[in-house]
Image (tube, helix red, strand yellow):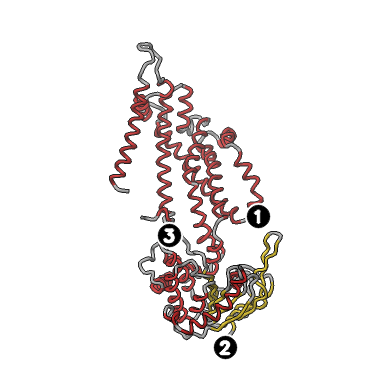
């Protein structure tokens, strides 16, 4: 992309954001009936206002609060990354083993389908009971979602390894371990990577839902949201949502970086 | 006559497609001698690739046997056998140099030696400057060169080639014929080369096994009496070439015609 194009794309993005925030601020300031308190065209009670959200954000970063927004964000990020990492490693390993062994795949198939079709949110109370109110419960929850996403992708990838590539390796003298390392794993990784971006989003969902009922210890942004519901504080919810959005963007960008580095052999990542 | 390296005896293969049994190869027998370049030609579906797959023990025969160096072909091909597929089997996640190095790495060759042998192979294939390129950036001809070099760098004594240049344009094909003949002239591997392109077979081979249409049997075996070294382009204008071509084409043509 040319530098000028890039600038204009960024200018458009900034423009859209400013118009959105401006409209929000403006519309939530118009009274429905003049001089009558409490009645707005769009009531800031429910969706707050950008200026108020900014104030609350600053307040939540100050030392006047017991738990700053940074501490909460850190807690959410930690649980998410751990759940994500454990989820992709176990999901990849399981997908590879089951993808390469018809017999094991047949044996485990009903268990996997059954467990995967359970809505994970229904497990939150149980997981909290078992693993307590700390980070561990959130990590387990994120793992239980990420594992299956990565597993199914890896499984498909491991099954669709080109048999002729394996034959070629054999003719070149490869043993079983070498075929695994130089053909099956690299070939499968391309499929696994496709599942990483959705995985990180789902890991975040799992963690936030866990935090909803997780209480203050190990409380992250999900805790702030549910606490704000209790006090009917839309501004604090918005602060939590904005920070969650920012975390989501940074993580997705990070994954895209790693992906384009490790999959640089693919045509779509070749420098044009 | 040189010793027999590949002996094919009464070889048959029947595929099962649902309830139907489809005979692909029927009672084929021929020998391939040491340092000999044998081409198998025939109409598509005549089982010529199936025969090659059985020699390379990629599929098991339904009847008869194959002996490679006196040993019956089992579940896995011996280390002296190399195979070049028609399909692009260059590993897309490895660079040109890394692809060519594969066989040497599998065999535990020392890194310094791998480097020098890969460099040699790269220059032999005319791929200088592309060592660190990924296959996705190469043309089909270059990728097939990489595949060929990857098989040759481990010095296989027997090379099985399944229509390796089938997907290439004529010009690229002729270049690769010249290169293959050059390499073969230096090392004299025993080659079994499957193709449906008669001119390719005549250009390259010492002997040509002509197959019938399905189920494939050996129709006739021809000796190609053209002198070596052969110039892949000039050869086609010589009277000997045209005579060989006419003779074999006649036999092959019958097989193609009966199909219609």
Which residue is identified by label 1? Answer: A103
Question: Depth check: A65 or B14 in front?
Answer: B14
Chain identifier of the residue bearing label 1 in the image: A
Q: Secondary structure at mark 3?
A: helix
Mark 3 packing: few (<14 Cα in 10 Å), some, or many (20+)?
some
Chain identifier of the residue bearing label 3 in the image: B
Q: Which mark is residue B136?
A: 3
Which residue is identified by label 2? Answer: B1
Q: Secondary structure at mark 1?
A: helix
Nearest to viewer (mark 3 / mark 1): 3
Place residue B72 in its image quadrant.
bottom right
A183 to the left or right of A13: right
Dot 1 and dot 2 within a common chain: no
Q: CA distance from mark 3 to mark 2?
A: 45 Å
Residue A255: horizontal and vertical position, in percent? Answer: 43, 46
Query: In the rendered image of this protein, does residue A56 appear above or below residue B133?
Result: above
Residue B92: horizontal and vertical position, in percent? Answer: 46, 60
Question: Depth check: A49 or B88 in front?
Answer: B88
Residue A244: horizontal and vertical position, in percent? Answer: 43, 35
Question: Residue placed at 63% from the left, 52% from the top?
Answer: A105
Q: Which mark is residue A65?
A: none
Query: In the rendered image of this protein, does residue B245 appear above or below residue A33?
Result: below
Question: Residue placed at 50% from the left, 40% from the top?
Answer: A202
Q: CA distance from mark 1 to mark 2?
A: 50 Å
């Amino acid at each position: 992309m040319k530098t000028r194009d890039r600038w204009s794309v960024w200018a458009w993005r900034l423009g859209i954001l400013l118009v959105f925030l401006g409209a929000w601020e403006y519309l939530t300031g118009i009274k429905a009936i003049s001089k009558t308190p409490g009645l707005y065209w769009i009531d800031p009670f429910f969706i707050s206002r950008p200026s108020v959200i900014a104030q609350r954000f600053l307040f939540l970063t100050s030392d006047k609060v017991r738990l700053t927004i940074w501490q909460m964000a850190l807690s959410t990020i930690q649980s998410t990354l751990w759940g994500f990492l454990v989820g992709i490693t176990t999901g990849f390993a399981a997908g590879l083993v089951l993808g390469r062994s018809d017999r094991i795949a047949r044996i485990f198939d009903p268990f996997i389908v059954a467990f995967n079709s359970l809505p994970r949110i229904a497990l939150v109370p149980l997981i909290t009971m078992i693993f307590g109110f700390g980070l561990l419960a959130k990590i387990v929850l994120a793992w239980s979602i990420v594992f299956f996403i990565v597993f199914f992708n890896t499984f498909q990838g491991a099954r669709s390894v080109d048999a002729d590539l394996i034959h070629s390796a054999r003719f070149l003298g490869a043993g079983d371990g070498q075929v695994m390392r130089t053909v099956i794993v690299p070939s499968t990784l391309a499929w696994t990577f496709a599942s990483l971006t959705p995985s990180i989003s789902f890991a975040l969902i799992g963690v936030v839902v866990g935090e909803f009922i997780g209480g203050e210890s190990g409380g992250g942004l999900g805790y702030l949201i549910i606490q704000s519901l209790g006090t009917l504080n839309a501004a604090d919810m918005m602060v939590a949502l904005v920070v969650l959005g920012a975390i989501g963007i940074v993580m997705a960008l990070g994954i895209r970086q790693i992906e384009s580095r490790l999959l640089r052999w693919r045509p779509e990542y070749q420098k044009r | 006559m040189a010793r027999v390296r590949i002996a094919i005896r009464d070889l048959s293969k029947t595929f099962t497609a649902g309830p139907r049994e489809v005979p692909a190869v029927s009672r084929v027998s021929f020998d391939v001698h040491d340092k000999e370049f044998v081409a198998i030609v025939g109409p598509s579906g005549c089982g010529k690739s199936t025969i090659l797959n059985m020699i390379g023990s990629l599929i098991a025969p339904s009847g008869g046997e194959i002996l490679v160096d006196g040993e019956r072909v089992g579940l896995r091909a011996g280390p002296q056998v190399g195979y070049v597929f028609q399909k692009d089997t260059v590993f897309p996640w490895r660079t040109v140099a890394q692809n060519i190095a594969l066989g040497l790495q599998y065999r535990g060759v020392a890194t310094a030696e791998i480097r020098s042998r890969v460099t040699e192979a790269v220059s032999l294939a005319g791929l200088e400057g592309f060592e660190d390129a990924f296959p996705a950036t190469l043309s089909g001809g270059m990728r097939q060169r990489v595949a060929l070099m990857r098989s040759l760098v481990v010095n296989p004594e027997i090379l099985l080639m399944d229509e390796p240049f089938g997907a290439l344009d004529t010009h690229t094909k002729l270049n690769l014929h010249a290169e293959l003949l050059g390499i073969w002239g230096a090392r004299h591997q025993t080659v079994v080369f499957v193709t449906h392109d008669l001119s390719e077979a005549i250009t390259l081979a010492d002997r040509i096994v002509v197959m019938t249409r399905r189920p494939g049997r050996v129709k006739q075996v021809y000796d190609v009496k053209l002198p070596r070294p052969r110039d892949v382009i000039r050869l086609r204008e010589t009277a000997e070439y045209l005579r060989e071509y006419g003779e074999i084409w006649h036999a092959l043509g019958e097989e193609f015609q009966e199909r219609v």
